[in-house]
Amino acid sequence: MPNWGGGKKCGLCRKTVYFAEEVQCEGSSFHKSCFLCMVCKKNLDSTTVAVHGEEIYCKSCYGKKYGPKGYGYGQGAGTLSMDKGESLGIKHEEGPSHRPTTNPNAAKFAQKIGGSECCPRCSQAVYAAEKVIGAGKSWHKSCFRCAKCGKGLESTTLADKDGEIYCKGCYAKNFGPKGFGFGQGAGALVHSE
C-alpha cells in the first residue's frame, strides 16, 4: 500500500514526521516534541534515552522500572530510597520474613534431603547455585542471616552458638562477657563512688 502522506510515521503519535522535525532512535522516527520519557515526560536526546521494546525512557526512569532493585541501586552513594516503584506500575512483593531456625537438630552436620544438603534455617534442600557455607553447614543465601536481628552475614562476620548463627554485635550482646567493666566501650573500666 503506498504511503501517500510522505515521510515516516512518529513512533509515539503515529503522524507523519517531516525531515526538519525528525529525531531517529533505534530505527524509529519521532517528532522532536514527541521524543519524551514515557514516565516523567522529560525531553530526551541521544545521551539520555533508554529504549525498552517500543517504549522510550530517560535513563533514571528506565533504571527504576527495569533496573536492579534493592539497597544500593539507583540513588547514588550512601542513599537509601524507600521508593518501591508503584508510580511506575511495579508491583512489590514482600519476601518471606526472617525467622529463626525451627530445625530441632540444627547442629547435625550436613543434613541431607534426597542427596542435597538441608538448610538449618528453613529445612529445605540447598543446591550449589544458592549455597553459602558457614558454621560448618550449608545455608541458602537468603537464610544466611543473624538469628536475632536478621542482618545478612558473610562467613567472616558471623559467630555461631548451638547450631545457630549471629552477627558479631548480637552474639556479643547475648553471649559475651557480662558484669563490671564490660559494655562501656573502648575497653574502659568505669568505677563511680
Image (cartoon, rainbow, N blue to C red):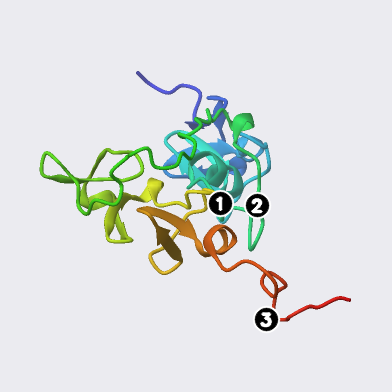
From the viewer's perspective, is residue 124 above or below residue 50? above
User: Can the viewer see residue 24?
Assistant: yes
Q: Residues within 10 Å of mark 2 (few under 14, many from 20)?
A: few
- 155 on left or right of 115: right
Name the secondary structure under disc 3.
loop
Q: Between residues 18 and 171, which one lies in front from this camera angle?
A: 171
Q: Circles 1 and 2: CB distance less than 8 Å?
A: yes
Q: Residue furthest left?
A: 115
The residue pinned by badge 1 equals: 71
Q: Residues within 10 Å of mark 1 (few under 14, many from 20)?
A: few
Mark in the foreground, 3 or 2: 3
Q: Circles 3 and 2: CB distance less than 8 Å?
A: no
Q: Residue furthest right?
A: 193
- Measuring 59% from the left and 42% from the top, which residue is drawn there? 61
- Callout 1, which amino acid? Tyr
User: Residue 187's mark?
Assistant: 3
Quadrant where the N terminus lies? top left
The residue pinned by badge 2 equals: 80
CA gap between label 3 and label 2 equals 33 Å
Percent of width and height locating residue 7: 49, 32
Q: Circles 3 and 1: CB distance less than 8 Å?
A: no
The image quadrant that residue 162 belongs to is bottom left
Quadrant where the C terminus lies? bottom right
Q: Between residues 179 and 161, which one lies in front from this camera angle?
A: 179
Mark in the foreground, 3 or 1: 3
Name the secondary structure under disc 1.
loop
